[in-house]
Image (spheres, rainbow, N blue to C red):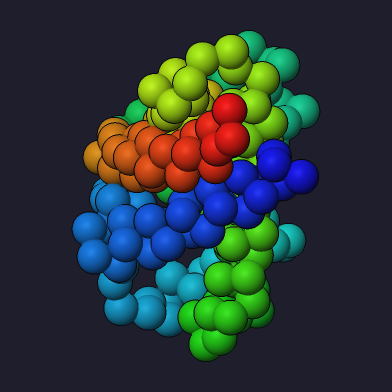
Amino acid sequence: MRIIVAGLIGGLVFFFWGAIAHMALGLGDRGVHYGKIADATLSAMASEFVVPGIHVVPSLPEEAMADAAKVAAFTKDSAGKGYAFVVYAPGGNPGMADMGPNLGTQWASDTVAALLAALVLSLLPGGFGQRVAVATALGAFATVAVLLPFWNWYLFPMEFVLGNLAKHVLGWAAAGAAMAWWLGRGR
């Protein structure tokens, strides 16, 4: 029960930190550019992208990636041209109209992450400081494990990676302090 309560506390702390980090500090959106709705671009995507999901443009079909000649020709042809990593949803983004479901999902995912972190923190023999340090390291680990490969392979802006690194390190330090406090009670 101690771990569950610690996870719930950590989830709430990280959720509210995420709101501050995004809305007040802009840490989660660094390197993301918002522009006007471009009807021509959306029309082109609707005709080009057959299914919703992530599209990398330009790219080779998967079956062609094993053919060295096709890879060489593609590399030569696409040199110096633009590149895009696009999340395409033909029905639009319902979260723009009603953020309630998205906020609920965010809180739930933050809480699941905090429950996992609380389990790890509960296994540590040390006290408050060690638990906060480990929670902080977990925030750094998550960012490095997920976003550095996206920077490397999909060209995510380093500004985006660093902003999210700061968001996760600071957020998990705060959530870790709250969870460490709860876990250390009555020791």
The reply to whether residue 97 is in sight is yes
Which of 37 and 58 lies nearest the eye of the viewer?
37
Question: How many labels, in total?
Answer: 0
State the image coordinates of residue 147 (x, y, percent, origin top left).
46, 33
Query: Going by the picture, which residue comes out furthest to the front?
Result: 186
Residue in the image at 42% along x and 62% along y:
16
Q: Residue at x 68, y 31 (%)?
A: 119
Is residue 51 or residue 30 the one in the foreground?
30
Q: Residue at x 38, y 43 (%)?
A: 174
185, above or below 106, in the image: above
Q: Is residue 7 left or right of residue 144?
A: right
Which image quarter: residue 33? bottom left
Q: Position of residue 75 (x, y in %)?
A: 46, 24
Q: Quadrant of residue 51?
A: bottom right
The one of 2 and 35 positioned closer to us in this rendering = 2
Can residue 137 be seen?
no
Residue 56: x %, y % from top left: 54, 44
Quadrant, the C terminus:
top right
Give percent across and percent down for residue 141.
Answer: 49, 24
Image height of 93 relative to 172, above or below: below
For the N terminus, the quadrant is top right
The residue sitting at 48% across, 39% down in the picture is 181
